[in-house]
Amino acid sequence: MTSNRRLKSYNMKEIKIGLLGCGQVGGGLIQLLKRQADFIRQRTGITLTIDRILVRDISKPRGVPGGLLTTNPDEVIYNLETDIIVELLGGLEPARRLILKSLSAGKHIITANKAVLAVHGEEIMRTAQENKRQVYYEASVCAGVPIIRSIKEGLLANRISSIQGILNGTTNYILTKMADDENKSFADALREAKESGFAEPDPTLDIEGIDTAHKLAVLSSLAFGIPSVFKSIYIEGITEITQEDIKNARDFGFLIKLVAIAKKLPDNWIELRVHPSMLPEKHPLTSVRNEFNAVLIHGDAVGEIMFYGKGAGPITTASALLSDIIELSTKISTHQLKMENLYWGKRRILPIEKTNVEYYIRFPIIDKPGVIGKITTILGKYNVSISGANAILVPGKKSQGYLPGSVYVITERTAEKRIRQALAQISKLPVMRDKPFMIRIEREY
Ligand code: HSE
């Protein structure tokens, strides 16, 4: 009898939610919540209701009663009816301030904001612990792909030694389109990504690799048990990749992707890098196309495991947000909230100069006699061995009476410091018509 009563009251549980921000993702969440409301009630016994929404413009229609909208964040944060606040403002401020305020007001937080977690994650997690509140962030990395929950729960029995991922839909879309169609320019592909709603409001965050680094910071913090390492991540974007590089990559048997890499090395060293990488055609990440994301993880018990799915878009992101809302609501209604030990790992971040991989290098030259010899002599001086090479003349205006051309080189594995020293010296040669450009080759996974 007692247990029946308890079951009855659990079945009737209603959880009210406040939203901070209601742009494209917020709209997706409202839509998905409406679509799945009955299904969620059937599965969990919980009714989810949006109770108050912070917006900039109250007059804009959002598919909810106008009375729910407010321009005052305090009306969302201090609403006594709500247990959970979903932060969808994006960016650092005011998101950080409002998250901290919500936690201090006794609310649980769900966020899709990778930037605020990457930069202020420690402060947010500490404030959550002090207030015995939870922060859920499945939507912050790879949108609908349940990578956070998989690391937190499914891979709990593993020591994770490496993560390799394509974590940004926009740049993967651009690189895919440029590889598929040699007439497609970078600018055209970026415009299409913007129109499809994948790109950040400021797309330089995508193309400069910063969005990928935010996500890598979130993943590596979780997988290695270390506070956010965003500031220590080496970051290069895709803006200097040309059709020439994409074609050469193919000729040498590679595909270019923007890859996030976190790797544990002996003595607590960790490699953390985001940059364009040439991947051999058989590498699992080469099959990840368009706006899709993938994360390849190595765990000591499970071995290789790969997660794959759409990494951007309002409804896919809403899928992750709603899964967090459902899980948190279930825990609230069954009194199962627990605090975690967030940081247990040790770390020393490896400087990029100590990275040791193979390199593709493009040397823009003028085709004077002896040019290849001059380049290879300097590479040899710095102990850089060459495993493959190619050279072409580029149709164009003569410079100093000579045709422009390019020399392409693939090196053996080399410490990056030596490559950098060699390229600095080669840049000064009078036969160079522009600075050399290199892409790291990642064969391991
Ligand atoms: N701009 C991001 C991307 C959106 O392209 O992946 C999802 O985080």
Image (tube, helix red, strand yellow):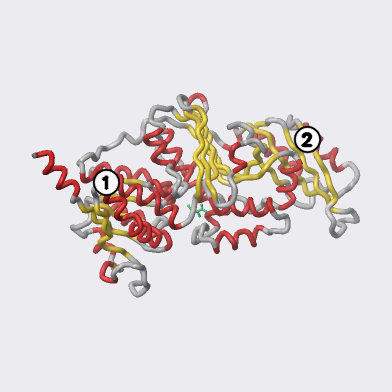
Camera-nearest label, 2 or 1: 1
Residue lying furthest bottom: 59
> How many labels, in total?
2
Residue 352, which numbered label? none
Q: Quadrant of the C terminus?
A: top right
Q: In the image, is 251 to the left or to the right of 113? A: right
**Residue 262 screen position, x and y as percent:** 51, 36
Marked residue nearer the N-terminal end (2 or 1): 1
Residue 25 is at least partly visible in this image: yes
How crowded is the residue under tag 1: few (<14 C-alpha within 10 Å), some, or many (20+)? some
Instruction: Residue type at mark 2: give it.
Output: Gly
* Alpha carbons under labels 2 and 1: distance apart: 59 Å
For image coordinates 27% across by 55% down, the residue present is: 48
Q: Nearer the viewer, residue 168 or 428?
A: 168
For image coordinates 36% across by 31% down, the residue present is: 344
**Residue 437 screen position, x and y as percent:** 70, 46
> Cβ(mark 2) to ligand 1 < 8 Å?
no
Residue highlighted by disc 1: 44
For image coordinates 27% across by 49% down, the residue present is: 42
Quarter holding residue 419: top right
Q: Quadrant of the N terminus?
A: top left
Residue 89 is at least partly visible in this image: no
**Residue 199 screen position, x and y as percent:** 52, 58
Residue highlighted by disc 2: 388
How crowded is the residue under tag 2: few (<14 C-alpha within 10 Å), some, or many (20+)? few
The kind of secondary structure element at disc 2 is strand
**Residue 259 screen position, x and y as percent:** 57, 42
Q: Nearer the viewer, residue 52 or 428?
A: 52
